[in-house]
Amino acid sequence: MISLDVSDRIQALRSLLGDIVAVVDLESVRATIAELSEKAGAADLWDNPDAAQKVTSALSHAQAQVARITSVQNRLDDLEVLIGMAHEMDDQDSADEALAELVSLEKVLAEMEVQTLLDGEYDANPAIVTIRSGAGGVDAADFAEMLLRMYVRWAEQHKFPVTVLDTSYAEEAGIKSATFEVDAPFAFGTLSVEAGTHRLVRMSPFNSAGKRQTSFAAVEVVPLMPETVVSEIPENDIRVDVFRSSGPGGQSVNTTDSAVRITHIPSGIVVSCQNEKSQIQNRAAAMRVLQSRLLLLQREEEAAKKKELAGVITASWGDQMRSYVLAPYQMVKDLRTDYEVNNPQAVFDGDLDGFIAAGIRHRKQKTD
């Protein structure tokens, strides 16, 4: 006789799913889908390609959200049927299959629950992530490229559209900096906990003496703002430079002056984009990133003023938040949450969900 008493765990999952549905407001999302579907079906939709892209992207995101919840609901129903069959047939194989599915559903719902904690003003927005190499010479540039690969892998594993907007390559190896966009719902809220200084400790492959090397890289995450939120930037406040794209291969690399660099003179913020094929497209993409950074800068200045009035001044940027240790032992540890794993290679391959979930929960606890 098989032993498969998991009714309490299934009930807990159904309760959690109910809470998630309430927070997401599934009926509201479905109403949004109906509205966007009507717009997407308009005959003149593609007369304005930019507006059409926004409509189809928003529709795709909303449909994916509903599909994920519906999938979990169906899987829970199927799981109960499978458990009933296992008991009725006294089949251990079916019982093992049911337990494996239960564990999988618990993991999926835990991830979905974390998303319900993202209630910040811009948490639902797509994200713009910039990685910059810091102290550590060639190792730091190589580390920055490792982080870029890590985040791109993470996005791809979740089927989030990711676009590298700009890459500045270092002379010997690695990158000086890179900026990429993750165009997915709650990408900013999810990735914002990754902002800060990351540290790598390893036996340097660039050191002939084989000495242990410590290097640093900074990660900046800003929300990509919709055009309805951002204000136009006066032309007198910006300087636009065009140059030829650089980097490995590609038909548009080193052939035309299509890459664009925009400097915001009052703040000193510099944004560049060379991913698109035309100068016009690169300028538009760079302006979107610049507007998002300026809005975030404004919010940070407002927050700093409030802290100053309260008599508390703290600076979080530059504080080391995570260590990746490859020698003399193997470990990746988040210094804010104490979450750690002993498989750095899996982390560099994009296995970041544990760190992100711990970071989101930690941030929520601090604000509550």
Image (cartoon, helix red, strand yellow):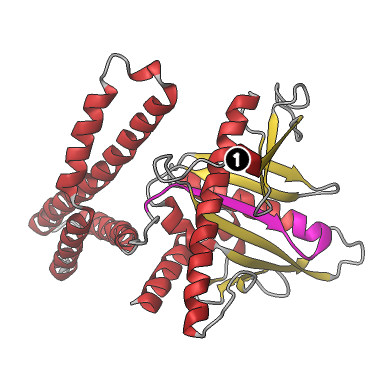
Residue at horizontal 61 percent and vertical 64 percent from the top: 344
Does residue 351 appear in the picture of this structure?
no
Q: Hey, what amino acid is under mark 1?
A: Val
- Examine the rendered structure and indicate whether residue 364 appears above or below residue 159: below
Q: 356 or 224: nearer the eye?
A: 224
The image quarter in which residue 43 lies: top left
Residue at horizontal 22 percent and vertical 35 percent from the top: 33
- Examine the rendered structure and indicate whether residue 111 appears above or below residue 325: above
Instruction: Look at the image and say whether residue 274 sits in the magenta stretch.
Output: no
The location of residue 234, given as percent across then percent down, is 58, 40
- What is the span of residues highlighted in magenta in the rendered image? 124-141
Toward the bottom, the furthest residue is 311
The image quarter in which residue 5 lies: bottom left
- Examine the rendered structure and indicate whether residue 67 appears above or below residue 194: above
- Assign a secondary structure to mark 1: strand
Residue at horizontal 47 percent and vertical 39 percent from the top: 161
**Image quarter of the N terminus:** bottom left
Q: Residues within 10 Å of mark 1 (few under 14, many from 20)?
A: some
Q: Is residue 88 left or right of residue 273?
A: left
Toward the left, the furthest residue is 88
| Tally of numbered tags | 1
Instruction: Look at the image and say whether residue 133 sits in the magenta stretch.
Output: yes
- Examine the rendered structure and indicate whether residue 162 appears above or below residue 365: above
Q: 115 or 300: nearer the eye?
A: 300
**Image quarter of the C terminus:** bottom left
